[in-house]
Amino acid sequence: MNGTRRGPRVVFWRHGQTSWNLEGRFQGSTDIPLTGTGVAQARRAARLLAALGPDAIIASDLRRAADTAAELAAVTGLPVSHHEGLRETYAGVWQGLTNDEIQRKYGEDYAAWRRGEPVRRGGGELETEVADRAVPVIQAAVAELPTDGTLVVVSHGGAIRTSLGRLLGLEPFHWESLGGLSNCCWSVLGRGGRGWRLLEHNAGTLPQTVIGDDT
């Protein structure tokens, strides 16, 4: 696979399971740790991702992402660079609430957000503002990669989706078309002739070379 790649590759890896994931609570920028299952998920995924031969690891400084990244660092020997810019969307008063609680208390804002309107959920950040802070961190790390290098970005579901949407050149309204990532699954971008292209999404196995008319 490495012999056919051209240009950098970016692996977006979501953190492992937390107790708030299990309870269906909006985590946002709240610093919630991994569960034991989350740690096990990270260790399993790290062994797979290490086979890609990553050249650099960057991560959100929230501990659920930082601890996930640490598992890959332990396998590869690479250092992890932590960045506040890769944190999950700050969602103000929505943080800590379940989906049902949010709909009950903030139904109009929730409905507008689901329609794709720009909403400061809970008085927090717009999705475009998350991309504004996350994407430059990713681009700076990509610029430091060797030719055909691989960067692993360890972050959060919302922050990853906004970053993917921005890098793929999608309008913000269409970012929701990128389905969410399961805990400790990943998406992969590769550089194509017209910019970034989505190679894998919500994967839990190693990316495979695509052989076909579109390569």
Image (cartoon, grey):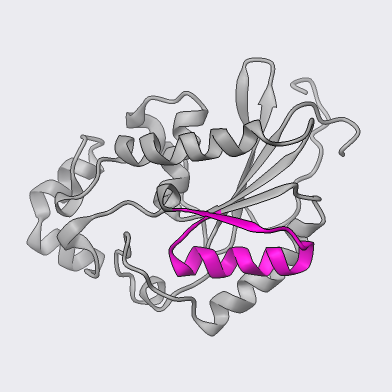
Splitting the image into 4 quarters, where does residue 8 fall? top right
- Residue sitting at the far top: 194
**Name of the residue lying farthest toward the right:** 3
Specify whether 196 is left or right of 49. left
Q: Nearer the viewer, residue 12 or 72?
A: 72
- What is the quadrant of the N terminus in the image? top right
Q: Quadrant of the C terminus?
A: top right
Residue at (79%, 20%) from the top-left corner?
A: 213
Front residue of 73/34: it is: 73
181 shown above or below 73: above
Q: Where residue 150 sits in the image (x, y, percent)?
A: 73, 42
Q: Is residue 12 visible?
A: yes
Q: Quadrant of residue 27?
A: bottom left
Task: State whether residue 124 is above or below residue 19.
Answer: above
Q: Position of residue 177 (x, y in %)?
A: 43, 37
- Disc tally is 0
Question: Which residue occupies 63% across, 68% down?
Answer: 70
Q: Is residue 165 left or right of residue 112?
A: right
Residue 72 horizontal/vertical position (percent): 69, 64
What residue is at 45 percent from the left and 49 percent from the top? 86
Instruction: Specify start and end residues of the magenta stretch as a single range.
Output: 59-83
Could you say where residue 19 lies in the image, as x and y percent from the top left?
A: 40, 79
In magenta stretch: residue 67: yes
Q: Nearer the viewer, residue 145 or 15?
A: 145
Q: Is residue 76 above or below residue 145?
A: below
Closer-to-camera residue (209/162): 162
Query: Is residue 201 shown to the viewer in this render?
Result: no
Tell me if residue 173 is in the magenta stretch: no
Which residue is depicted at the point 58% across and 67% down? 68
